[in-house]
Image: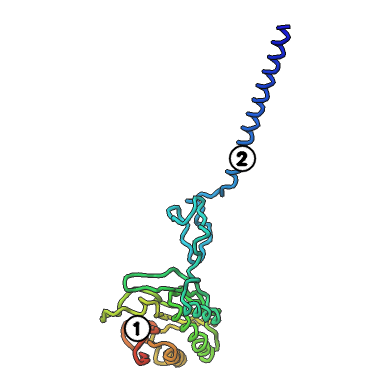
């Protein structure tokens, strides 16, 4: 009788141990499964190697490991503003609508501040309709809109009238640049993004019209450049070109400097 009792007790104890072992194995398997699932949700992104492949949207900070607004996976925080466009004054927003109506291809840039120089809401203009700007020009939106209006309404018709050709490319030598007016110590309009220097105008027919003072018998070129200067004075407050002084011997300087009593300097 005692032997039978011991056999039953041993069998019960073994069954208990087997049940505990089975439960332990099931728990371990469940834990392993859950851990693998969580890890699989983490983006497989190497911050140092992959950031260059992430698109750079307007106003987004560069995706680098040191950026405090990035998660460990190098993605932008969705609660941070993606673009400064929504915070622009109404005048800047309206100006950009004008650029679109004029067919200007542009990119909004981050604010520029360099001592006394800078642009609060700069744009980088790469084309005006089918006309390329080389290199792309960094300007205030007002200057970009003024230049685009002059290009479409005056420059293009003048080229068609004089050369029977459209304009292909405007080659510019300086847009935004932090500097002072030579010999005066006054901040140049280039330092405010309100100025653009045009070096040459390339036409669709292959002609590349150098802005420098033409030769004595270059009647068509002289007439075209005279139109550029005269028509520009209807749009810009300053037009300076070859013949004004040595510094402007090889380009036309256009700007929209704000002067008292509406004075314009066209020379």
**SS at circle 1:** helix
> Is residue 218 at all visible to an observer of this figure?
no
Which numbered dot is residue 105?
none
133 relative to 264 in the view: left or right: right
Write down the residue under mark 1. 248
Percent from the top left, x then y, of residue 9?
A: 69, 14
Task: Give residue 130's quadrant in the image.
Answer: bottom right
Q: Nearer the viewer, residue 6 or 188?
A: 6
Q: Above or below — where is 125 with respect to 30?
A: below
Q: How many marks?
A: 2
Circle 1 packing at 10 Å, graded few (<14), some (14-19), many (20+), is some
Residue 19 placement: quadrant: top right
- Residue 18 figure quarter: top right
Percent coordinates x, y for residue 11 in the rendering: 70, 16
Residue under label 2: 34
Identity of the residue drawn at 47% across and 80% down: 91
Quadrant for the N terminus, please: top right
Query: Which residue is located at x 31 percent, y 86 percent?
Result: 245
Work out whether residue 85 or residue 188 is closer to the camera in this orientation and state it. 85
């Amino acid at each position: 009788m005692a032997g039978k009792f011991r056999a039953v007790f041993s069998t019960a104890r073994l069954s208990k141990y087997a049940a505990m072992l089975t439960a332990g194995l099931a728990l371990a398997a469940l834990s392993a499964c859950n851990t693998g699932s969580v890890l699989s949700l983490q983006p497989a992104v190497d911050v140092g190697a992959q950031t260059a492949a992430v698109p750079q949207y307007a106003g987004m900070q560069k995706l680098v490991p040191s950026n405090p607004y990035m998660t460990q996976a190098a993605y932008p925080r969705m609660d941070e503003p993606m673009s400064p466009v929504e915070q622009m004054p109404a005048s800047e927003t309206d100006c950009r609508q004008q650029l679109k109506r004029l067919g200007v291809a542009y990119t909004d840039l981050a604010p520029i501040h360099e001592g006394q120089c800078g642009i609060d809401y700069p744009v980088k203009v790469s084309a005006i309709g089918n006309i390329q700007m080389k290199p792309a020009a960094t300007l205030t939106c007002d200057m970009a809109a003024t230049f685009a209006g002059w290009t479409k309404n005056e420059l293009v018709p003048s080229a068609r009238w004089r050369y029977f050709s459209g304009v292909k490319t405007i080659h510019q030598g300086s847009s935004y640049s932090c500097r002072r007016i030579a010999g005066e110590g006054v901040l140049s309009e280039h330092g405010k993004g309100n100025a653009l220097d045009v070096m040459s105008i390339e036409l669709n027919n292959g002609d590349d019209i150098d802005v420098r003072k033409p030769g004595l018998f270059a009647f068509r070129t002289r007439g075209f450049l005279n139109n550029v200067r005269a028509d520009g004075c209807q749009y810009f407050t300053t037009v300076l070109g070859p013949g004004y002084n040595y510094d402007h011997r090889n380009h036309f300087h256009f700007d929209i400097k704000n002067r008292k009593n509406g004075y314009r300097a066209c020379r």
